[in-house]
Amino acid sequence: MAWLVAAWLPHIPHPVLTFKGEQGTGKSKTASMVVNLIDPSPATKRSQPRDVKAWATQAFNSWALCLDNVSAIQPWLSDTLCKAVTGDGIVDRALYTDDDAGALAGDLAERLLVLDLQLIGEDKRRTEEELDSAFDQARPAIVAALLDLLAAVLAELPSVRLERMPRMADFARVLAAVDRVKGWHTLDAYTAASANVNADALEGDPFGSAVAEFTEACGTWTGTAGQLLELLPPPDGSIRSGPRTPPASAASSSASRPCCVPSGSSTTTPSVPGIASAPG
């Protein structure tokens, strides 16, 4: 609900709403209904684009875009989604290397709002026709309620001050305003969910996982990015799945830092190029 309210505010970054669940949880239908509340379209669900140009074609005239059945996110799409969150223009970059993948994955993880959907029992399932009919009847009342809530949030928003500012600070302020109006705890839920997403991203980043394990084992360490690269074992036993140069190592260490923090370790990159330190 709070994400839908924020979606009506054009001047702030919006996290990527991600529906997660096994088959039979209604991910595609839920996403389609959400998009139809803020950007109605006869074709709400789109296939994963094959490149930046295909993405630009899909996104050019859309305020909200639903990518259906996404099984894997390539580095270029991760970068493009990050730009979509902040409203940046599309930059056509033709080539990404293996060294880019970890950094982009960490960036995207901090811009996700993940909702876990529960399996729908056979006794509660409905046909597409029934769902569409019920949604069409309820949609005007839902949009009216959203607009009422939006008006109340806009009135509250100027007085909202956060003690701690997360990465998506503008969106977090909207959540705080929604909580004031409705008495909910959406900001706390979002913060907790973000920590879980960071942990998942770190688990899926071999180099970031290796850095986290290294700092937990040895505590404070200071040295160059090249020295760090030599000390870490090849992720998954293969150099190809991790950074292969000191600059790439420094970039990956910096990008993994937000994902490492919730697990109890961190990495920092000072302004001197090529230097990385990892306090425990």
Image (cartoon, rainbow, N blue to C red):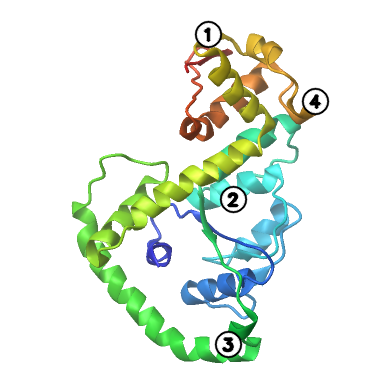
Q: CA distance from mark 1 to mark 2?
A: 34 Å
Helix, strand or loop under label 3? helix
- Give the number of the mark in front: 1 or 2: 1
Q: Which residue is mark 2?
A: 81
Q: Which residue is mark 1?
A: 222
Which numbered marker is on residue 34?
Answer: none
Please indicate, yes or no, whether residue 215 appears anywhere in the rendered image: yes
Q: CA distance from mark 1 to mark 4?
A: 25 Å
- Mark closer to the chain start, 1 or 2: 2
Q: From the viewer's side, name the closer residue of 211 and 11.
A: 211
The residue positioned 67% from the left and 65% from the top of the image is 68
Q: Identity of the amino acid at label 1? A: Thr
Q: Identity of the amino acid at label 2? A: Leu
Q: CA distance from mark 3 to mark 2?
A: 29 Å
Within the image, what quadrant is residue 28 found in?
Answer: bottom right
The residue positioned 54% from the left and 26% from the top of the image is 254
Q: Quadrant of the N terminus?
A: bottom left
Estimate how packed mark 1 is, as few (under 14), some (14 to 19) or many (20 or more) residues with alpha carbons within 10 Å: few
Q: Which residue is mark 4?
A: 237
Q: Which residue is mark 3?
A: 132
The residue positioned 51% from the left and 86% from the top of the image is 135
Residue 225 shown left or right of residue 166 in the figure: right
Q: From the viewer's side, name the closer residue of 11 and 37.
A: 37
Q: From the viewer's side, name the closer residue of 155 and 195.
A: 195
Residue 154 spot, x, y in % from top left: 26, 63
- Give the number of the mark in front: 2 or 4: 4
Residue 213 spot, x, y in % from top left: 60, 23
Q: From the viewer's side, name the closer residue of 53 and 249.
A: 249
Helix, strand or loop under label 1? strand
Q: CA distance from mark 4 to mark 3?
A: 50 Å
Within the image, what quadrant is residue 184 found in?
Answer: bottom left
Estimate how packed mark 3 is, as few (under 14), some (14 to 19) or many (20 or more) residues with alpha carbons within 10 Å: some
